Amino acid sequence: MAMQAWRGLPRTGRRDGVGHRMTRQAAAYPLLPLGGGVLLAPPMARTFGLGRPESIAAARAASVGGHLVFASLRDPEGEMSGASSVFGVGVTAVVIEAGTLQGVVRIFVEAVQRVRLRTFTLQRDGFYRVSAEPWDDPPIREAELRPLHDRALIQFEALCRCASLPAVTTKLVRAGAPADRIEGIRSLPWVALSHLGQDSPPHWIPIAQRQALLEAPSLPDRLRLLIELLDGAVPPASLAADMAPFILRAADAAQLS
């Protein structure tokens, strides 16, 4: 079922996150704080249902084709009361679609770039506008990353066996984060974690550990952190029952077995 577009907003706009690099200077965008242990990282794309009036106002301020800043709350069950409520590193995301579906305001966004959050300005509608300084990973050759990519997948596969997840899970992650493209390697931590537990209900891996991945100074550092995280992770007994239906549906859709 398609979303009904907000009145006065176009259904489509330019996708600034594709083939477009933002300026190096900090720019101010509406902030959407993420509760419940949810984290958004490039190049993830997802739909959010918005309930708080200030969140709806922030999304409307960005409009379709514009950017929002997403940052996770330090306390997953807390609320946004100022700059210290959220982690100091988040992402910019372009709003691909916005509207209402079954009476709920929803936005579909694509994470574009990691940013450092600088100044916070409270707006009349209750949301914060935050200046965000782009923070790119330093350049590195793909060939230097592939051994780390392979080690992370080996560790991921071992964890899947320990948790009794379907054998096809690793194939799904390989397909979603291929080692022959830098973007695929960059996607690996987030694709892997998505198959180890979805964000809602909150992910069993604490938000602080996932935030550390986002804040890693380089892509090799992020992959090493992922390997350490997977090596030390103790999945809940319910993980296989919770995730197997999602994994098997995804494998069927991808025609993997």
Image: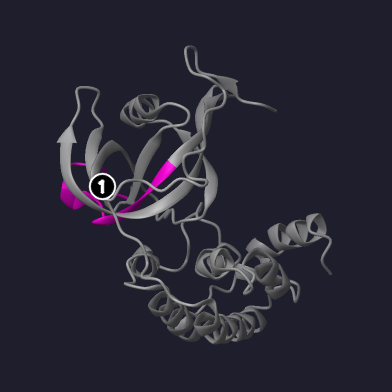
For label 1, the crowd category at 10 Å Cα-Cα, with few meaning under 14, some 14 to 19 and many 20 or more, is many
For the magenta stretch, what is the residue range? 75-93
Whether residue 19 can be seen here: yes
Whether residue 82 is visible, yes or no, is no
The three-letter amino acid code for the residue at tag 1 is Ala
Above or below, 15 against 19 in this view is above
Quadrant of the rendering where the C terminus is positioned: bottom right
Reading the image, the residue beneath label 1 is: 132
Up-down relation of residue 13 to residue 110 (above or below): above
Q: Is residue 143 magenta?
A: no
Frontmost residue, 120 versus 104 = 120
From the viewer's perspective, tell me whether residue 129 is left or right of residue 139.
left
Q: x%, y% of residue 184?
A: 58, 66
Which colouring convention does the figure follow? one colour
Between 126 and 66, the one lying in front of the other is 66
Q: Is residue 78 magenta?
A: yes
Residue at position x 40%, y 56% in the image: 37
